[in-house]
Amino acid sequence: MAGIYLNEDNSHYFMERADKASDIKEIRDFILQYERTNVEKMFLCASCQKTNFPTKTGSIIFEDVDYDSPLFDRLSNFSKWSMAVGDIVAKGIDIYSIWIDTLRETGISPWMSMRMNDVHNADDINSLIHSAFYKNNLDYRRAMYRDEKWEDRQLDYMIKEVRDYHFGLVLEYFEKYDFDGLELDWMRFGNHFKAGYEDEGRAVLDDFMRRTKETALKYEKIRGHRIELAARVPVKPESAFDMGMDGAGWARAGYVDHLIPSPFWHTSQADIPVERWKQLVYGTSCRIAPCIEICLRQYAFPGCKNEFQYNSIETIKGAAKSFVDRGADAVYLFNYMDRQSAPYDEAGYREIITSVGKNELMNKGIRRHVLTFNDRQPEGMPSDERLPCMLKKKKFEGFRIHTGTAVAGEARFALLSFKGREDISSTDIEVYANGRKCVFDGKKDPGHPRPVNTTFAWRMPAESVKDGYQVLEVVACDEGFVLDWLEIFIG
Amino acid sequence: MAGIYLNEDNSHYFMERADKASDIKEIRDFILQYERTNVEKMFLCASCQKTNFPTKTGSIIFEDVDYDSPLFDRLSNFSKWSMAVGDIVAKGIDIYSIWIDTLRETGISPWMSMRMNDVHNADDINSLIHSAFYKNNLDYRRAMYRDEKWEDRQLDYMIKEVRDYHFGLVLEYFEKYDFDGLELDWMRFGNHFKAGYEDEGRAVLDDFMRRTKETALKYEKIRGHRIELAARVPVKPESAFDMGMDGAGWARAGYVDHLIPSPFWHTSQADIPVERWKQLVYGTSCRIAPCIEICLRQYAFPGCKNEFQYNSIETIKGAAKSFVDRGADAVYLFNYMDRQSAPYDEAGYREIITSVGKNELMNKGIRRHVLTFNDRQPEGMPSDERLPCMLKKKKFEGFRIHTGTAVAGEARFALLSFKGREDISSTDIEVYANGRKCVFDGKKDPGHPRPVNTTFAWRMPAESVKDGYQVLEVVACDEGFVLDWLEIFIG
């Protein structure tokens, strides 16, 4: 049994509610929908580069926005967001304080979340989403010699001005809002240094976290209650360390009370080494709350061409059950916001926010454990994407999938798909689960999410059923099979 | 500054000294050569599957050997080994006790090392190297459904009889020999469970280590001095954990006093995350002694076709300096035995055993930091070999190499080689070090070890010089370049 930590991003409410966003009932109702769900803490994100609140340090979302420009009209989502925040500020409404109070009323712990190095739209330096600080300091970007992707345009935290600017925003969060805790979101986005300077960077972020903790302690006296800190960090402790974000070290130093091992965005990663995180923070009170992203892809965007690239309730239950069985203290949901028509309908959303983390509900019905990958690796380390995987004839190709604790009576299937194959025979492919041969069971459609081509099922023998990790091995009996999808389907 | 832990394997002395092996002066001289070197502890390995000492539990090396069979004659190395041990036993010589005493005389701490799951020659079940226990229990082998390599024929430690048999041998080591410590060598070979059962296996090995520690405590009273334990485990703590060998957990439980993160055999791995090992055993007195293997390959045997596939003093100094600068308490040398003509001559051997671990010597002259790989990964995880690497036109391909602390005045070069290329021009390839562009410097032969094709140098700019990790990025300006070798050459 674990509660949900729910992240509400900094644009969704304003884009979605648009001209209703300043309505006090709308503001309160937005929070009240989470009453009597399994949401334990809500993380209200109030800034990317720009803030949703008036700021002396940074730039509010509508700063330097020319409402009359034709550019502005074309950005309908940005327009809604910017105008909604403008309307709220003009009316003197302090929306985050209202949300914090409403969360306390409902028994949900109110948190805020600050994105530490957001570079949405960084390819377009004229984008209205960029802060004045970013646009005025283009030489602070970390990897412009390379400039292959948005992350190369993240700011370099080895530069004192970058740290000072962001610490100024941290202080504003504390000054303005009476939250139970503040999350520093180091995974939006996840690269904070020039390539090669991650070890030096680790010392710098350690100090940043230490100063943030000092600030929290100071504000505990002002607010009269405990103020905790959380950090979103990479999925694997060793990647976090090698990327300069030593979450476990921060926990041991007493700087953070919650760590959120998180993918970046390309995909959820259901295989988060919770046991090892717990081992690393042993002896502290730090809680581990692994993150489920909304996206699910077997390899990175844009190579992955699946029709539906989101988690469904079955894949969420798979990941969440595995996390909880491995010792997670909570399940963190990122990008699971209301009224998003693509990934779920209204009833689906209710099911997610009420059942995720509750063993008795997660153990019922279908669970799916899909092989994905870690979408953030240290500089100089390649992606660990396993798919698509060209199988060598008669060679065993092994994969690890964690399925949590086995539930009595469940049937387990390995589900595989191969590029361009709509039919295969029982003699084309052999599948082994934990060293035991599985039995071909023909086509089986697991529903969303699914790969482009047909999925085929192999029944895992009863003797192979065990807790925790399952090693699946795939052997192609001929050349030419490219594995494109792998999951364990339990139901 | 760190001492050397030197492993002497269980066949080398007997094969090399052959009919002189029972000569008492030869026996003592073998040890005395290490006097006044930097060897701090010597690990005398006395068993693979068979032992070099009379045993009630197992099989001595000459057991079931038919000296008259033509097969025996053909195995000249095995013949020398087996007959030398036979001769020593027949003469009533207790060679390990003599070695232990001589080591104490010379001020070197005498240790013994037991191989926990050795499967040399496992493809040939009639090989004379196999113990009776192994041959009589072929159904204890771990992965015969797959049977692709020797390791699939390792014994499954989930089987109680396997544990009991090996624990019986552990007890014999304690009963027979008065050592300062015993090493359990879990990396000869490194797979102890059926695929998928590594987490369950971890509990089983934890218990095995606990019982070994209890035995050590019992023998401390008998011997009247402290008896330490060591374990060879995989290079990365997370791989060790996921393979069921939780070295860091053993240290925290007080079961081991020394951990030896070790490659298997294909190659040395100069990038061992010593800091993270130290962090994991923080608060214990466990020392971390990363291992340098004799082999050095950029990718696995037999694909790797280099003429010379061993470390040289320059690559050893590179790895050892990196280890020590990262906090290693000692440097462990595996397969660095005397009178091996291929990897080093007599003077070269003296240099290795006297200078490795000593900063003032390692910092002098040429150091080479060659990109290799981890040759043992958990079941279901692919090899992390990066080479050979087909470069994509105009795409940055990044690599991480750890070079330890920078030494003032040193010149650094990135050395690269490309499959089939004996000439390239300055416009073919760009190399970046820590985000700074390097300058093409033409062909440069680093000496042994080296790849098949010519190596080319790029001078790393002074501004790129830093301690610790270096991120090298390689960009091919056209199609068709396959990177086959990468190193940082410092001199």
Image (cartoon, coloured by chain):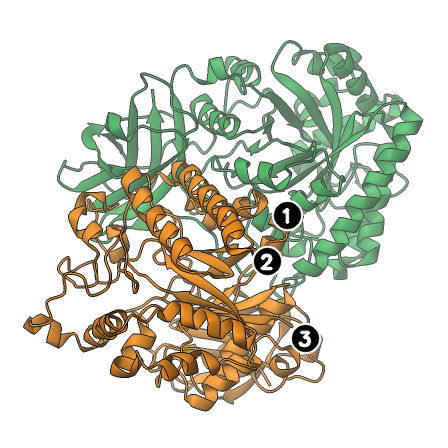
Chain colours: A green, B orange
Q: Which circle, 3 or 1, is nearer the viewer?
A: 3
Residue density around tag 1, few if under 14, some if 14–19, many if 20 or more, within 10 Å: many
- The one nearer the camera, A393 or A271, is A271
Q: Amino acid at mark 1?
A: Gly
Answer whether labels 2 and 3 touch (C-beta < 8 Å): no
Q: Is residue A466 above or below residue A185?
A: above
Q: Which element is circle 3 on?
A: loop
**Tally of numbered tags:** 3
Residue B131 lies left or right of residue A282; in this view the side is left
Q: Which element is circle 2 on?
A: strand
Figure quadrant of residue A183: top right
Q: Amino acid at mark 3?
A: Ala
Which residue is disc 1 drawn over? A190
Q: Amino acid at mark 2?
A: Arg
Residue at the spot x=65%, y=12% of the render?
A33
Which residue is disc 2 drawn over? B287
x, y (%) of residue B270?
51, 68
x, y (%) of residue B280?
60, 49
Question: Is residue B159 at all visible to an observer of this figure?
Answer: no
Q: Chain of mark 2?
A: B
Check chain identity for marks 3 and 1: say if they share one.
no
**Quadrant the C terminus of chain B occupies:** bottom right
Which residue is disc 3 drawn over? B406
Q: CA distance from mark 3 to mark 1?
A: 28 Å
Answer whether labels 1 and 2 touch (C-beta < 8 Å): no
Question: Is residue B385 at all visible to an observer of this figure?
Answer: yes
Q: Earlier in the sequence, mark 2 or mark 3?
A: 2
Q: Chain of mark 1?
A: A
